[in-house]
Image (tube, rainbow, N blue to C red):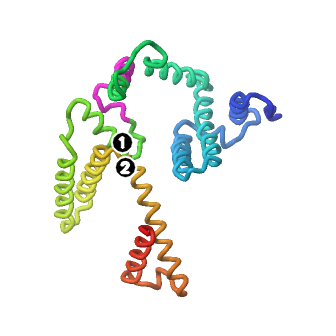
Amino acid sequence: MPAPPSDAAPLGRLLQIMARLRDPDGGCPWDLEQTFATVAPYTIEEAYEVADAIERGDLSDLKEELGDLLLQVVFHSRMAEEQGAFAFDDVAAAIGDKMLRRHPHVFGDHAYASAAEQSADWERLKAAERAAKGKAESLLDDVPTGLPALTRAVKLTARAARVGFDWPDVSFVFDKLREEVAEIEAEVDEADPARLRDELGDVLFVVANLARKLEIEPEDALRGANAKFIRRFRHIEGELAAKGSSPAQSDLAEMDALWDAAKALERG
């Protein structure tokens, strides 16, 4: 089975490639075995790869990762088309219609007095769309369960905040955080795994609220902390290796001192 011509329109060519990969007559056995559920983890992974390329400022890599993410959309669309549900063109048309609907100030004659007014109307339009679908009985119903837990916590509390269920200011969040930390400290001696898990969840939930109040994306903040940890631990490894040693041969006091040295170097 010949490959689609390389001079074909790029998107049409990609759609043809996926159709052939999924063709029961001579297609790829792996691609043919996949379902929405088995492909979903790859879709999530590719979205993170895009975010990683952006964070690194690598535009060449970003181009490749966006292609990988686009392939996921094409893959899901192809499987849906095979079931007679929808096709890629329906996906593109639906998001186009949504963008037109949600930007009446650009594609219509509506005018907003401020960005805040526009954001409020955006949420109103989204709420109207949810109501039209007849799915959401609660304000929180359609916050996706597949989101990273910290991100979902931010979205859940932001939804509740729209109707006034929120702390007045960030000082109340700090008070709550201290309260929750005290509660988990009190549970440590009991060593009940279920209780500890519950109390730690409360701490993380308040941290997500703190991030929302500070207008910081918690996943971004945690990725930054991860990168910082890697940098500083690699410094420890490098300094020890220069002395013919390693972390396994060192002790906490020595590694702590090297950690502090790495911090001092970063601060200049």
Alpha carbon separation for disc pair 2 and 1: 10 Å
Quadrant of image for the N terminus:
top right
- For label 1, the residue is 152
Residue 133 x, y percent position in the rendering: 39, 20
- For label 2, the residue is 218
Q: Is residue 32 above or below residue 135?
A: below
Amino acid type assigned to the residue bearing label 1 in the image = Arg
Q: Which residues are magenta?
A: 125-143
Residue 237 x, y percent position in the rendering: 50, 77
- Identify the residue at horizontal 43%, vertical 12% (top origin): 109
Q: Is residue 70 above or below residue 123?
A: below
In the image: residue 243, left or right of residue 18: left
Residue 219 x, y percent position in the rendering: 40, 50
Going from the N terminus, do you reach mark 2 or mark 1 first?
1
Q: Nearer the viewer, residue 268 or 151?
A: 268
- Identify the residue at horizontal 28%, vertical 39% (top origin): 157
- How dense is the environment of label 2, judged by Cα within 10 Å: few (below 14), some, or many (20 and up)? many
Q: Nearer the viewer, residue 183 or 8?
A: 8
- Identify the residue at horizontal 28%, vertical 51% (top origin): 207
In the image: residue 48, left or right of residue 186: right
- Identify the residue at horizontal 43%, vertical 57% (top origin): 224
Quadrant of image for the C terminus:
bottom left
- Check residue 23 for magenta coloring: no
Residue 257 x, y percent position in the rendering: 39, 80
